[in-house]
Image: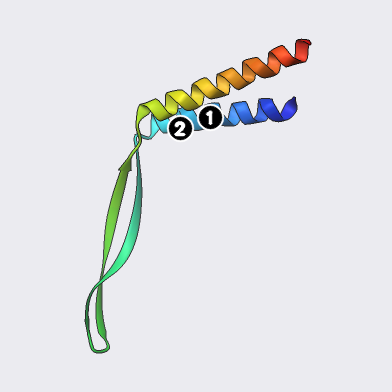
Amino acid sequence: MKTIVILSVALIVMGAAVLGYDHYSYTTTEQILQIGPITATAERTHTVPLSPIIGWLLIGGGAGMLAFGALSKKN
């Protein structure tokens, strides 16, 4: 029972975070040139957009799990 409540709250928090941050960015270092012992690298930033639908699904799933946990406690 307590595990369901903790998981549902975690899902709701993750859903709110996805709604707050609409993209995810990360940086990679790539080697662009190598001539003998000399190398040149470049850092590139990649952006992955996050759909608000994912956030709403996480919030809805967390709310559903929270309701399920409350109903199972009554029985």
Question: Which residue, as the protein is rendered here, is positioned at the far bottom?
Answer: 36
Q: Relative to residue 12, is residue 55 drawn left or right?
A: left
Give coordinates of residue 26: x percent, y percent.
Answer: 36, 52
**Residue holding disc 2:** 17
Q: Dot 2: what SS?
A: helix
Q: In this view, does 8 lie to the left or right of 15?
A: right
Q: Which of 13 and 1 is in front in this view?
A: 1
Instruction: Say which mark, if any, is on residue 13.
Output: 1
For the N terminus, give its image quadrant: top right
Q: Are marks 1 and 2 in contact (CB under 8 Å)?
A: yes
Classify 55 as above or below 64. Answer: below
Q: Could you say where residue 6 lies in the image, as x and y percent from the top left?
A: 66, 29
Residue at the extreme right of the image, as rendered: 75
Question: Which residue does the image show at 28% across and 54% down from the upper left?
Answer: 45
Which disc, if any, is residue 29? none
Bin the neighbour count of mark 2 within 10 Å (Cα to Cα): few under 14, some 14-19, many 20 and up.
Answer: few
Quarter holding residue 51: top left
In the rendered image, the quadrant that contains the C terminus is: top right
Residue in the image at 74% along x and 27% along y = 2
Name the spot of residue 66 as percent of width and height, x first: 63, 19
Number of marks drawn: 2
Q: How is the image coloured?
A: rainbow
Q: Where is residue 18 in the image (x, y as percent from the top left)?
A: 42, 32
Disc 1 is placed on an element classified as helix
Establish if 63 lies above or below 43. Answer: above
Residue type at mark 2: give it: Ala
Looking at numbered disc 1 in the image, what kind of residue is underneath it?
Val
